[in-house]
Image (spheres, rainbow, N blue to C red):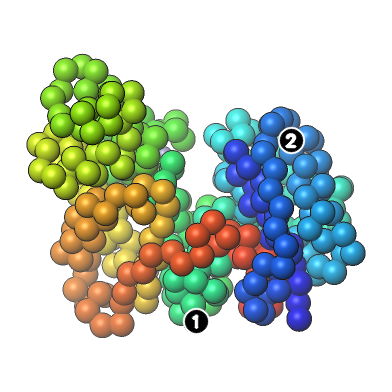
Amino acid sequence: MTLAVGVDLGGTNIRAALIDVEGGRETGDVKAPVQNKNPEAVADLVAKLVAEVDPDKKRVGVGVGFAGMLRGWTGVVVNSPNFGWREVPLRALLRDRIGERTELYNDLNAIAFGEAKYGGAKNIADVLCVYVGTGVGGGLVLDGKLYIGSTHLAGEIGHTKVVPNGRLCGCGQRGCLEAYVSGVHLQARAQEELHAGKQSSVIALAKSIDNVHAGFLDQAASAGDAYASELWNEASGLLGLVLANAVTLINPQRLVMGGGVWQGAPELKRRTLDVMRSLANKPSIDSGFSVSDTLLGDSAGRLGAAALVSGVFS
Ligand SMILES: [Zn+2]
């Protein structure tokens, strides 16, 4: 049995688990809130959780899934809006505390690998995994291996452009998919438009404009509300278009979809998949292609990061 520690390093919480890599099982799991976003303090907290979950150092390594953009295999965080970091040598800080066999992965890449080995695409070689939640991200597993691209930035589907010079995205550029379909952007946009006088039954559903979020918009769209339905047509149209083009380009056997917005918005999901199926290259989806929801919930990233660092599947 190969044991490795998998860590989810998110902007709100850090979770760590000791994982039986061949079995895909967590043998222990700890969690702590991120109270101090100073890089040294975050590295200290990760090291503390790793020691808690694996006090006898039975692990072959520590894999960390991190919410941010990385530079190649240098372990340097180029940019992480969640932490407010730029150019932080996170892997070096972690290795100083934990040991050499510690590796950093983009969080969606780790999730994609976890789903491809243990979850919604188990035993499938070519997988595209896309999360629509607070942000929008993706990961690619090709021929059974994680594909990170030339500089570790493959899978950034949320920052593909859907409207030239469109809405401002958290990445600093305009017109990204994320600026039209992420939970944060949908909520902010709907609240802004409703405060400006747009009429919608979603206000009554949410009890106030400031409570409106993607889940309420989905209920309103499903019930035929004109405002929510129009917003949902736009969001599903853009998301479906990007997914269709990604499927046409990559030719995966399975598309795994997850994230808080995706899971909490069945109407958006239905419309998006209709658009995706109508726009994807026909032969690419006509045989052997299927769509699945994520199966591992929030343990996918820990499982994937542990599996990656263990080297068991490479
Ligand atoms: Zn962007």
Q: How many marks?
A: 2
Q: Position of residue 7 (x, y in %)?
A: 68, 55
Residue 260 image position (x, y, % from top left): 41, 48
Q: Which residue occupies 31% across, 74% down? A: 290
What secondary structure is found at the residue carrying circle 2?
helix
- Name which residue lies at 24% across and 39% down: 217
Under circle 1, the secondary element is loop
Using the image as rendered, state which of residue 60 and residue 164 is in the foreground: 60
The quadrant holding residue 234 is top left
* Residue found 15% across the figure and 31% down from its top: 201
Indicate the amino acid at tag 2: Pro
**Residue assigned mark 1:** 123
Can you tell which mark lies on residue 39? 2
Please name the amino acid that badge 1 sits on: Asn
**Disc 2: CA contacts within 10 A as few (<14), some (14-19) or many (>=20):** some
- Decide which of tag 1 and tag 2 comes sooner along the chain: 2
